[in-house]
Amino acid sequence: MSEPLTLGIDASTYRGTVAVLAGRSVIATAEVAMRGEREERLMPAIADALGSAGAAVGDLAKVVVGAGPGSFTSLRIGAALAKGIALACEIPIAAMPSLALLAAGADNPLANGRYLAILDAMRGDVYAMLMDSVDGTVVAVTGEQLLARGAVDALAQRHDARIVGAGQSIDAMPHARGLARLAPSLVRDVSLATWEPAYGRLAEAQVKWETEHGRSLTTG
């Protein structure tokens, strides 16, 4: 293939998504449930997407994985698979913000304008990120933030932004195919040895433990 192949993976929600890109063009995609399954399904989805693209893992030049925030367990699975592929193939690994994939991963490019991407953070909160769509390219306006769900509409109105998210006026979930529409500044190379996803907040199990014991798992 004339263009270098990139594998995009996002598992920030209970749906894992995969995209194979030749240069900036998406040539194959796959998606799979990440919750309520008896076996891990994301690796077979990666194999299916590569097969649809007529490629093998060894043909990849780079792997880019959604960095979160989002589901703790799903993000760990996505990160582990991305790292394993990068290590085995001796190729670079990069990270992309999963919230940006809400806007960038839509079936069709969003119209020019400002958007507020939100993702459920549980406990009455959402993860939120303001971004612009400029001629089909998604550019970050702010970083990710944790926001009370009740404050979403006011923030969107203040910035004249349309809301993107599950059940919103633009109903969407993060999708790895959005890698093709992300501004280069949103895709950053990371260290295979030290990088971890940005989970956004503590896992439910850790919150419960700290509530019961009155201290952090990390401080003993």
Image: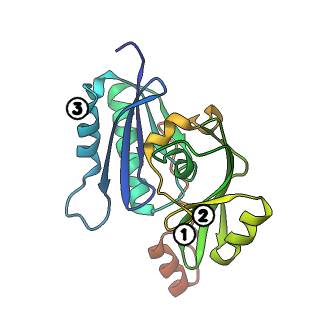
Residue 51: numbered disc: 3
Res 190 seen here: no
Rendering quarter of residue 211: bottom right
What is the x, y in percent for residue 190? Answer: 54, 36
In the image, what residue type sits under mark 1? Ala
Image height check: is 119 above or below 87?
A: below
Q: Residue furthest top?
A: 2
Q: Secondary structure at mark 3?
A: helix
Q: Which residue is mark 2?
A: 127
What is the x, y in percent for residue 75? Answer: 43, 55
Query: How far apart are the two marked residues, 2 and 1, measured between alpha carbons?
Result: 6 Å
Res 101 seen here: yes
Left or right of residue 158, residue 14 in this image: left
Q: Looking at the image, which residue is at 50% across and 68% down?
A: 167
Contact (Cβ within 8 Å) of mark 2 with mark 3: no
Q: Earlier in the sequence, mark 3 or mark 1?
A: 3
What is the x, y in percent for residue 62? Answer: 43, 28
Contact (Cβ within 8 Å) of mark 3 with mark 1: no
From the image, which quarter does the C terminus lie in?
bottom right
Q: Residue furthest left?
A: 38
Q: Looking at the image, which residue is at 58% across and 79% down?
A: 124
Colouring style: rainbow
Q: How many marks?
A: 3
Residue 121: numbered disc: 1
